[in-house]
Image (tube, rainbow, N blue to C red):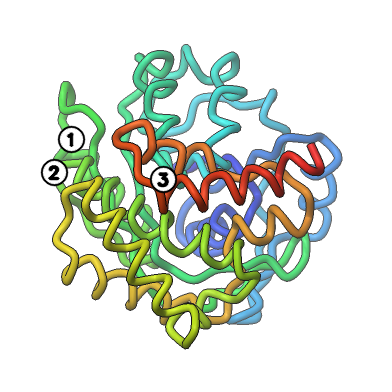
Amino acid sequence: MDVAIIGAGAIGLLCASYINQNHTVTLYTRSKETAEALALSGIINDTYHQRTYPPVLPIDAYKHHEVTLVAVKSYHIASLVPVLKQQSGLFVFMQNGMSHLEVIQTHFIHSRNWVGAVTHGAKTLATDTVSHTGIGQITLAPLQKNFDWQADGRKLRKCLSALHPVVSEDAYPILHIKLMINAVINPLTAYYEVTNGELLTEPYHDSVKRLLTRVCHILNLDKEAAYNTLKRVIQLTKSNRSSMLADLLNQRPTENEAILGYLLSIQHDPLVAYYYQSIKKREDDYT
């Protein structure tokens, strides 16, 4: 199967390291320099001591692929529109938050669009090295059903077989659960500057429960089921530094707007707003 992966972060590298074992993978990066460096070094899966050498190209060189996994940050989706808006094929978007969905539904009108929620633990150790820190799954669902989504689901199961794919019919429950996970783990680890696993210890665990209650109310989720899912993901990724914390420490843009900002666009909540403003202030200090 001809597979493209856009984005060379932890999830992009993890997917490339596994999928390239049984399929033809092309990895696309934002810059020509990164593409050239990864083409020379290959991609290392540190957990299994494997090195693989898929072709790596800058995104401007994108061509049609049977399956395209989009593993960039949510705020980078808009920058892909000029390159991808005329493309057909099967696209899987694996971003945090939900504010980017409007861009997908407005501009990606020729492709068959899916979403993917990843619960595997993964972190980059170097530009070319990823560590698979926790075995989870990838839950997939079509954003629209004006195509043979069941056939595409079978194709994705084959493509992502090494990463435990689960295909669902309805995207929005999956997106809400993923948003719940990100809306608790990302802001709290960033606010307290702790690893994911430390959220299950005191004094942070009380903050988890309080924020989870507010998030579940906004998204109309069952709190007990949500907590069990959240706890499982935290345990799978216990040694990880969340993407939001890593972004703040490296003075990069965060996905605060796509996660907490999106929740506040649904319903104002003082606790959610407190964490949103706290993260925003830290981000504004260096942007």
Q: In the visual, does 41 lie left or right of 207?
A: right
Pointer 2 residue: 169
Depth check, front residue: 226 or 212? 212
- 287 vs 274, left or right, is right
Q: Nearer the viewer, mark 2 or mark 1?
A: 2
Mark-to-mark CA distance, 2 and 1: 8 Å
Q: Amino acid at mark 1?
A: Trp
Q: CA distance from mark 2 to mark 3?
A: 23 Å
Task: State the residue position of label 1.
Answer: 149
| Sequence-first disc among 2 and 1 | 1
Disc ID at residue 1 = 3
- Which element type, helix, strand or loop, lies under badge 3? loop
**Is label 2 in a helix, a strand or a loop?**
loop
Label 2: how many Cα within 10 Å (few below 14, some 14–19, many 20+):
some
User: Toward the viewer: 90 or 9?
Assistant: 9
* Pointer 1 or 3: first along the chain: 3
CB atoms of marks 2 and 1 within 8 Å: yes
Q: For the point 65% across and 70% down, which residue is it?
A: 193
Q: Position of residue 99 (x, y in %)?
A: 42, 32
Q: Is residue 171 above or below residue 134?
A: above
Question: Which numbered disc, 2 or 3, marks the residue that appears first in the sequence?
Answer: 3
Check disc 3 and give the amino acid type.
Answer: Met
Relative to 114, does residue 211 appear above or below in the rendering? below
